[in-house]
Amino acid sequence: MSMSDTRRNKLAVLALFAITAFWGASFVLMEDAITLQPVPDFLATRFVLAAAILIAIRPTTVLLFTKRMWITGGITGLFLAFGYVTQTIGLDYSTAAITGFLTGLYVVLTPVLAWLLFRQKLNGKLLFAACLALVGLGTIALTPTGVGTGEIWVIVSALLFALHIVALGKWSPGADTYALTTMQLIVTAVVTSALAATDGYQPPPEPSVWMAVIITAVFATAIGFMLQTWAQAHMDASRVAIILTAEVPWAASLAVLSGQETLGVRTLIGGLIMFSAMLIVEWPSKRKPQPGEIQPMHPAGHFE
């Protein structure tokens, strides 16, 4: 590896860690913002701005919107849109740390859903990780009165995000990644705007909400996607996936440092179990996959 390649590799690692910090901060910022602005209105503002930024950066992207992309981008965009809606509703009822932990379930749910929907084989590592994640989920979400409302919404969002990744894995090969991501953000913007319009759209009421919108739209979504795409061109996909799991501890630690919440022992233990399950799924294996055996699938973009 040349000196320039080594430098690019280091820059890629730093870029990915910066992205995970933005993603972790997003949970903390959104929790305060959605107490001041309705969830659909916040999401509509965020995704209209994010989609507009991606189009402004590369206007010719719209010329790549083929009929096939309208269909695939439309379907995957719907999964993405309702994934964000349910996740943010869950955040409104739960905490930033728990939302971050439970959203990470999509990493384990993705190969399981691919097996259920397309009969792709599961290897032992994925099965073990799925069982481990279930233990972590139970530790966090189960209480003497059952699973909380917020936790249910976030689990639904993780399921929708996993369906989104499975659909992308099936339909995205050969498509322009930037154009397909832009299409999905447009669909998300349209869906959230329609939901916001049902009760009359309310703009961000104060500067703190605008700050949350700008950070989540500009940094966590638009710039985050571009940095991730650039980093993945200079790093092995497995290393990228492992680094991106840093989003989970970022969300928990920033929530605590901001004074927004304190982590109970049960949440901390359950979160560590789930984080371990994510690492098991993402960690590269020296064993060659068998024909038809599903491997971890990663989205073109991230969920926060």
Image: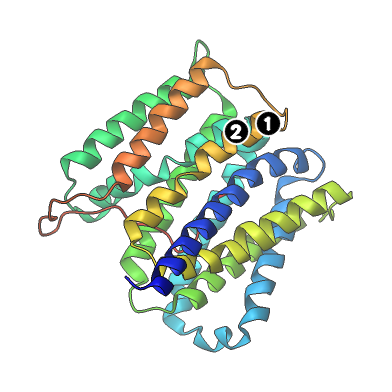
- At 52% from the left and 44% from the top, the residue drawn is 247
Q: Which secondary structure, mark 2?
A: helix
Q: What residue type is labelled 1?
A: Leu
User: Percent x, y for residue 157?
Assistant: 51, 44
Image point 81% across, 56% down: which residue? 201
What residue do we see at 37% from left, 40% from top?
A: 278
The answer to whether residue 256 is visible is yes
Looking at the image, residue 85 sits to the left or right of residue 104; the answer is: right
Asked whether, in this view, residue 48 is left or right of residue 75, the answer is right
Q: How crowded is mark 1: few (under 14 residues within 10 Å), some or many (20 or more)?
A: few
Label 2 crowd (10 A; few <14 / some 14-19 / many >=20):
some
Image quadrant assignment for residue 240: bottom left
Residue 119: give x, y in percent of width and height. Answer: 19, 52
Q: What is the number of the mark on residue 120?
A: none
Q: Farthest residue in the front direction?
A: 3
Q: What element carries label 1?
A: helix
Residue bearing the label numbered 1 = 257
- Residue 253: mark: 2
Quadrant placement of the N terminus: bottom left
Cβ atoms at labels 2 and 1 below 8 Å apart: yes
User: Could you say where residue 120 lies in the image, as x and y percent from the top left?
Assistant: 19, 54
Position of 205 with respect to 52 (left or right) is right
- Of residue 250 and residue 92, the one placed in the foreground of this image is 250
| CA separation in Å, label 2 and label 1 | 6 Å
Residue type indicated by callout 2: Ser
Task: Single out the residue that lies furthest toward the right.
Answer: 206
Residue 106 location in percent, x, y?
41, 45
**Scheme of image coloration:** rainbow
